[in-house]
Image: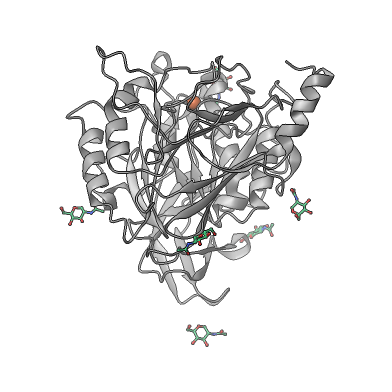
């Protein structure tokens, strides 16, 4: 697969042409042969400029933000000070350098086997205006650092908004390339579909690699929210070394506004952001009938008002539809339980990661299937969700290059290359999705499709 003959080069050229296709039922799926490099690149060394620790005493580092409430008028600011807690203040205002207001957050550290974290701060700024730029500053004296963010537009029918979509990022040279390409795009916030740092690939899950990852993403995540989903690499379950609480580093370092959507766990929650309601699910938490996540999902879906947020987007880590050989069928248990609700509530698009490749399905449903009727061929139907697998951020494990054959009818396009996605919501009926493979730079779309709103069309 790593050497390409001349005939497959011809296929490469065809696939590189920008394809703007409405995801029409029953069109033949495309398996791109455009695989430039299968081997993973190395992780950025700890002293690489993109991940190295600041030299100044107690300088705020690993700065990142998350939406802080359901509506979009609050922001969680998180950062780390290595040497002492400091004053924990976030100064903020609409004019740079002229701060009239501040909030003080909480600070704590956690340990993992023989690692002890710096002081992790989380502060919530609330009562913000929509669609407004705010500057904020953290730290003090010679280590004060300033950043800014723009709040989302108020949710209403014809609001446009652009989301980036990234998954399974890790911290290799490929990860850096994905991040740099994304940062050169018009994405206003990131839908992150799980598997963040891959610190667990190091001996004893060396949590220093959580610090390096958080520094890697800071140039984007300090300025726009990364709306986070937990993946299997967030589990950090290491009982043989006394670490028995799943998601410990992840939940200490990254906060989500789960309480404001009445969730009881930071691992599943929903937010409104501009024209979309985003529902984040946990592939590695119980989801069977009667479980907290199951009951919460039904309540969250019922609450969505498509007149206010016409778009309904679901994020999870393990894909429900995946025709790659890697992790094939792993999403089936959740599909059996949850797909009926995604179809019933007309979810527009479901983003997942886990598989280190890209795949876009036609709108598809398999809810007619039960264990005895044999109707196990997913039906392509315009009113069903589109499923996009985008676990190709560029982590240390490399690409998932083996696809199942023949390509399933539901699969519209699949390719094993690193990259990121852009979901450009135009109005209440139309969104453009483009997938950008790293090697071609930001402006070249390797796959693109119009996603039509399932509720409004
Ligand atoms: C700082 O902000 C306050 C309140 O917004 C304003 O009254 C004042 O003029 C500003 N000062 C400067 C130097 O911009
Ligand atoms: C943690 O333990 C491992 C294995 O014993 C060792 O290599 C490493 O240096 C230790 N780290 C710290 C921070 O003590
Ligand atoms: C920052 O300030 C402290 C004293 O407050 C000083 O000791 C230190 O050298 C300063 N660091 C830099 C990089 O200027
Ligand atoms: C960013 O985009 C500009 C303009 O399209 C392009 O010239 C530049 O090479 C891009 N940079 C990266 C890192 O992709
Ligand atoms: C949370 O529950 C309260 C009380 O039932 C309800 O008023 C509110 O709308 C709910 N909010 C969300 C975002 O689900
Ligand atoms: C929505 O956006 C699409 C694509 O830009 C455009 O063709 C369509 O006319 C727009 N519809 C409305 C109601 O504005
Ligand atoms: Fe994964």
Using the rendered image of the protein, determine whether residue 58 is visible from the camera's viewpoint.
no
Using the rendered image of the protein, determine whether residue 427 is visible from the camera's viewpoint.
yes
Residue at 51% over, 69% down: 134
> Looking at the picture, how far across and down is residue 324, in whole percent?
54, 20
Q: Is residue 340 left or right of residue 64?
A: left
Residue most extreme to the left = 290
- When the figure is inspected, residue 33 is found, relative to residue 55, above or below; the finding is above
Q: How is the image coloured?
A: one colour
Residue at 59% over, 49% down: 218
Residue most extreme to the right = 6
Ligand 5 lies in quarter? bottom left
Residue at 26% over, 18% down: 370
> Looking at the picture, how far across and down is residue 205, in whole percent?
52, 24
Q: Is residue 447 left or right of residue 101?
A: right
In the image, 297 versus 426, the foreground residue is 426
In the image, 416 versus 406, the foreground residue is 406
> Looking at the picture, how far across and down is residue 171, in whole percent?
63, 34
Q: Quadrant of residue 421?
A: top right
> Looking at the picture, how far across and down is residue 279, in whole percent?
35, 44
Q: Quadrant of residue 342?
A: top left
Residue most extreme to the front = 26
């Amino acid at each position: 697969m790593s050497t390409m003959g001349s005939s497959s080069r011809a296929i490469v050229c065809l696939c590189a042409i920008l394809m703007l296709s409405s995801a029409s039922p029953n069109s033949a799926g495309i398996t791109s042969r455009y695989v430039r490099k299968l081997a993973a690149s190395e992780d950025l060394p700890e002293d690489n400029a993109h991940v190295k620790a600041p030299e100044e005493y107690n300088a705020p580092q690993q700065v990142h933000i998350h939406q802080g409430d359901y509506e979009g008028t609050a922001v969680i600011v998180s950062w780390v000070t290595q040497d002492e807690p400091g004053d924990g203040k976030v100064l903020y205002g609409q004019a740079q350098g002229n701060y009239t207001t501040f909030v003080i957050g909480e600070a704590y550290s956690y340990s993992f086997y023989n690692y002890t974290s710096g002081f992790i701060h989380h502060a919530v700024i609330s009562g913000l205006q929509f669609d407004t730029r705010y500057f904020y500053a953290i730290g003090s004296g010679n280590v004060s650092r300033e950043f800014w963010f723009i709040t989302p537009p108020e949710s209403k029918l014809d609001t446009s908004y652009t989301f980036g979509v990234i998954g399974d990022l890790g911290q290799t040279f490929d990860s850096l390339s994905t991040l740099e390409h994304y940062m050169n795009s018009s994405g206003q916030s990131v839908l992150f579909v799980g598997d963040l740092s891959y610190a667990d690939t190091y001996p004893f899950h060396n949590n220093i690699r959580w610090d390096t990852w958080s520094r890697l993403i800071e140039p984007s995540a300090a300025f726009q929210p990364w709306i986070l989903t937990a993946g299997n690499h967030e589990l950090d379950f290491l009982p043989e070394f006394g670490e028995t609480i799943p998601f410990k580093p992840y939940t200490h370092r990254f906060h989500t506004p789960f309480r404001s959507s009445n969730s009881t766990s930071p691992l599943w929650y929903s937010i409104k952001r501009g024209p979309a309601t985003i529902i984040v699910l946990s592939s590695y938490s119980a989801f069977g009938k009667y479980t907290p996540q199951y009951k919460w999902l039904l309540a969250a879906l019922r609450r969505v008002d498509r007149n206010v947020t016409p778009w309904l987007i679901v994020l999870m880590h393990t894909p429900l539809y995946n025709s790659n050989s890697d992790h094939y069928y792993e999403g089936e248990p959740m599909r059996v339980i949850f797909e009926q609700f995604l179809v019933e509530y007309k979810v527009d698009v479901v983003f997942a990661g886990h598989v280190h490749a890209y795949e876009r399905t036609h709108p598809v449903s398999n809810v007619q299937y039960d264990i005895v009727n044999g109707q196990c061929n997913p039906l392509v139907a315009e009113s069903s969700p589109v499923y996009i697998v985008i676990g190709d951020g560029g982590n240390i494990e490399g690409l998932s290059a083996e696809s199942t054959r023949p390509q399933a009818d539901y699969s519209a396009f699949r390719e094993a290359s690193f990259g990121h996605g852009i979901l450009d919501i135009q109005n209440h009926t139309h969104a453009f999705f483009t997938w950008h493979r790293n090697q071609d730079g930001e402006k070249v779309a390797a796959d693109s499709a119009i996603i039509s709103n399932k509720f409004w069309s």
